[in-house]
Amino acid sequence: MGGLEEQKRKAVGTTKFFFHVPKSRRTLVYLLAWSFVAGLVNRAIYGKISLGGLVVFGGADGVLLLALPALFAALLAAGFASPRDFRNAFRYYLFLSFCASILAAVGYAAGVTANRFAGFDLLVFFLVVNALVACLWFLVSFVALNAKWRSAPISLLQPFFNLAFIFLWSRISFLEAGVTIESPVIAGLKLLLATAVLLFALWSLFYVINAPAKRNLGVNAIQAAALFFAQTIRGSKDFERVLEEMGEPALMPVRAFEFKTLGGKPKALFVIPSLHFGPFGNVGGSEYPARLSAELGQRHGTTFVWHGLVNHDFNPVESSDYALVAAAIEKALREAEKTEAKTGGARTAGFFESSAGAADVAGFAFGSGANAAAFATVSRFPESTEDFDYGLGEALRNACGARLRAECVIADRHNCLTDGTEVAAGGEAFAEYEEAARGIAPPRQAPFKLGVAAFAETGFSPPQGVGRAGIRAAVFEIGRERRKRYCLVLIDANNCVPAFRARAVESLKRKFGFDWIEIATSDTHSVNSLAGIYNPLPGGASSEALVKQMERAVEAALRDLESCKAWYAESRVRLDVMGAESQSEMLSTINAIIAVAKIIAPAILVLSILLVTVALLVWK
């Protein structure tokens, strides 16, 4: 298991290079500022000039030789590649052209330096640099922006404008002494030659990188990367085609508690599917909490979708399969209601809690006898509360059920992220959970009331760490004369940092005086993106604002308290999931690709640049 955790760490480590592309206006400011400074530097390198001339002419050099070609290239690329979504496409292509202008400026500075102090042919430098610019454009357009065949013509736009402006500006600028473009046609042919050589080198790198993925997973790594970025940028679900190739069929249990008022009106539904809500964005099972809440909430009242005791092995590969999960739950509920028709459901409840080490098991037992059932939650706060090996989760469920003499289902509160280690066989975490389960005693039961509230519109977005299911609160009041109140707040999010969880619980308990209160997250991966694989609450949101929204939900749940009865239901659903074997193969393949690329990519780049330089020097 340690090997798998190490593979995860290495693979996830690549995401530290991911980031959000800024808005167009900000990128344009960066481009103009960078171009101005780069022009000053090139002027200063090339020769002596007054400070005033350096600022005026150097800044003009930079803007005209770097900023304008980049802007024109971005405008044409966005219009050609994505005319229907021009604004969004322009944002990405402008950022790409800005990055390419940085590459061009560094290359120009190196060329000017080599020309002044070693007499090196400045035109050769400019041609090689713009060939590299073309390769950068092709790589990003093809892989990240998924422009497909359009990547080839698009990749030549900025190099073309760069050379065109150099040709014009060389007549009136400092470049006239260092570069001569006697024939723009010949210069263009040389650029095409240099670009072709570098693109062939890039294709060779693609071939080497793709080999492990094709062999181990049967998928094209470059295509998978293109679809991955397409999902991130445009919300496309085509990446699910890649997941389908790696999917494995599974028959997974889905469990639920249905609550109704004593008059039979639907009150709430607790859903605990043995599925993991990943892998990211709107792909696979990532949006299941929001989708199931909306689908089932129409008929069963406020729906809470909890994180079961599973890990990434059970990521659904099809987002549309949530309908299968909903259908399985509906079927189970219909059968449970028929079975419970004689008794009318469990009208009593009792709270239980047991701890051992960092492990805490707490929840509610409903009813007694053959139809008794219990809903438990687990956490290791302040230690890491992360994913659970499925087999160990079932073992813990059986252990808790044996102590409570009831059918038991367990939800992971998933409310404390530290080192990100999941509960695995042979670890201290599971040993503590087992010990805690052995300490559970069946609670004394009494009639109960339940109040619920759901706020899908929280003012927070997935990039801020809160999914579309928002914030939900459930308040249990047990007993009559000596009544006690317990509260669970469920947030559609991907875990919490310990400090936030502690602050939220303390604030809610102090304000409302509950006998027990806890917060949990659904572990939705819909909030995960390029720039955030681990983004626990408070994420990009304000801690204070989040706590206020939780208080708002709890207040609404308290106002909603009314006597209820409960049913337990269980069924199974057949669908394709990532699977343990696929996950291990995927992680090992990613790490193999990274290891190969670290060695091969620099070597191919250096050799191809040397080859292009020699070819251009020979072609006079």
Image (cartoon, rainbow, N blue to C red):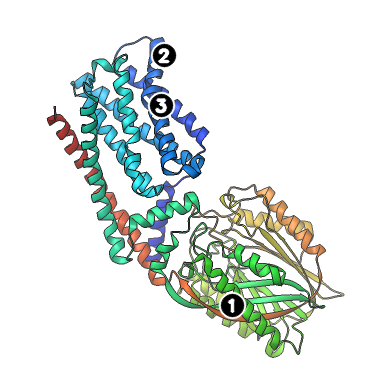
Rendering coords of residue 219 (x, y %)? 34, 63
Q: Nearer the viewer, mark 3 or mark 2?
A: 3
| Mark 1 / mark 2, whichever is N-terminal | 2
Crowding near the residue tagged with mark 3, few <14, some 14–19, many ≥20 C-alpha atoms within 10 Å: many
C-alpha separation, residue under disc 3 versus residue under disc 1: 59 Å
Task: Left or right? Give the position of 293 relative to 70.
Answer: right
Name the residue carrying label 2: 56
Crowding near the residue tagged with mark 1, few <14, some 14–19, many ≥20 C-alpha atoms within 10 Å: some
Task: Left or right? Give the position of 197 relative to 315.
Answer: left
Rendering coords of residue 97 (x, y %)? 40, 35
Q: Which mark is residue 68?
A: 3
Q: Secondary structure at mark 1?
A: helix
Point 49% across, 44% down: residue: 84
Asked if disc 3 and disc 1 are in contact, CB closer than 8 Å, the reply is no
Quadrant position of the C terminus in the picture:
top left
User: At label 1, which amino acid type do we have?
Assistant: Ala
Query: Is 540 located above or below residue 495 in the figure?
Result: above
| Mark 3 / mark 2, whichever is N-terminal | 2
Point 60% across, 64% down: residue: 291
The residue lying toward the viewer, choosing from 349 and 210, is: 210
Q: Which mark is residue 149?
A: none
| Mark 3 / mark 1, whichever is N-terminal | 3
Q: Nearer the viewer, mark 1 or mark 2?
A: 1
Rendering coords of residue 371 (x, y %)? 69, 87
Point 49% across, 50% down: residue: 234
Q: From where the camera sits, is residue 1 visible?
A: no
Name the residue carrying label 1: 328
